[in-house]
Amino acid sequence: MFTAMSNRLINLHLVSDSTGETLHSIARATLVRFEESQVVSHRWSLIRTRLQLDRVLQGIAAEPGPVLFTLVDRSLRHALEERCERLGVTALSVLDQVIDLLQAQIGAKPHEKRAAQHVMDADYFRRIDAMHYVLAHDDGQGVAGIADADVCLIGVSRSSKTPTCFYLANRGIKAANVPIVPGSPLPPDLATAQCPVVGLTIDVAALIEIRRHRLKLIGADGVRQDTSDYIDLESVKAEILAARRLCTQHGWPVIDVTRRSIEETAATVLQLMEAWHTRRSKPAAAPSDPAAAVLSTGKAD
């Protein structure tokens, strides 16, 4: 009975008066727990007038399903909730419980401000500045600017350095991307960088598969796969091992990205950054300190 229900097609409507990214993130994080279900998401963004809402309501009536919404305008909220009730469709304002909790703790009513998280404040410009930095320092470019980095990510080719850097930039983090290339020295500024340096590594088989796919995308099918060091099994093994040894020599922590999403890798980088700054602000930890040992040996996972 449960299996039959889980395989039923469900329409999920995401209604927002802003970009809808908050709803999309919540839905995506939740739906991964229902892998057997067939859920079709309908995104309705920038819904700010009754005319726009009417089109949404027509869509919900045509393909009924639960509604998640973030609408500040009270009249729009009321119209949506009233229509959903008549259709027998559940409608949930996803931020209400959080707002109620904070209101009780803070003791003040929230401002009814649409898309407040997207205002062009100092944080917004910090993210834009970080994005420009990542573009200028991707894959070893602009090595002279490493001194301005908040974090440096190093690793062999195709170990997800670039997407992780861009994800961090969206958090306002200036992340430099430095590739480890066999036979090529690292930028001299890296050893003296006044920011944490984090190595990214990956399983050999996974890396070879990613690189094979990359060669196909760039039209390099003519490369002999049995002789190219780029995808040769033993060469790739040696490349990854050398990169790990390099990080160990410098005391740089290493993250294995094989089974991690970009978001998970970035979250771990942020944790390592916090630990690095904490250590810098305190006297040197004793050798017996387990936390210090993880960061100094480069064995963080």
Image: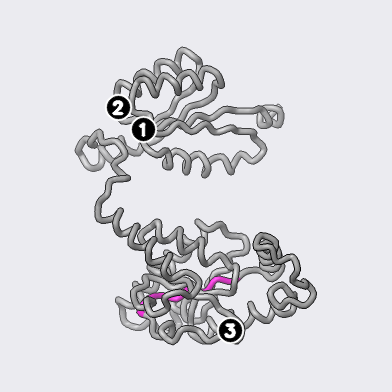
Residue 266 is one of the magenta-drawn residues: no
Q: How crowded is mark 1: few (under 14 residues within 10 Å), some or many (20 or more)?
A: many
Q: Is residue 81 visible?
A: yes
The residue wearing badge 2 is 73
For the residues bearing labels 3 and 1, Cβ distance under 8 angstroms: no
Q: What residue type is labelled 2?
A: Asp
Chief secondary structure of the magenta span? strand
Name the N-terminal-most of marks 3 and 1.
Answer: 1
Kindly identify the residue that appears in the image at 52 percent across and 44 percent down: 29
Q: Toward which corner of the image does residue 76 lie, by quadrant? A: top left
Measure the alpha-carbon separation of dots 1 and 2: 9 Å
What's under tag 1, amino acid-wise?
Answer: Asp
**Marks 1 and 2 in Cβ contact (< 8 Å):** yes
Disc 3 versus disc 2: nearer the observer? 2
- Cα distance between the residues tagged 3 and 2: 57 Å
Q: How crowded is mark 2: few (under 14 residues within 10 Å), some or many (20 or more)?
A: some
State which region is magenta.
Answer: 194-201
- What separation in Å lies between label 3 and label 1 (alpha carbons)? 51 Å
* Most foreground residue, 163 or 200: 163
Q: Does 271 sit above or below residue 48?
A: below
| Residue position for label 1 | 17
Left or right: 207 with respect to 266?
A: right
Instruction: Look at mark 3 in the image and give the residue it sits on.
Output: 245
Q: Nearer the viewer, residue 259 or 121?
A: 121
Task: Report helix, strand or loop for mark 3.
Answer: helix
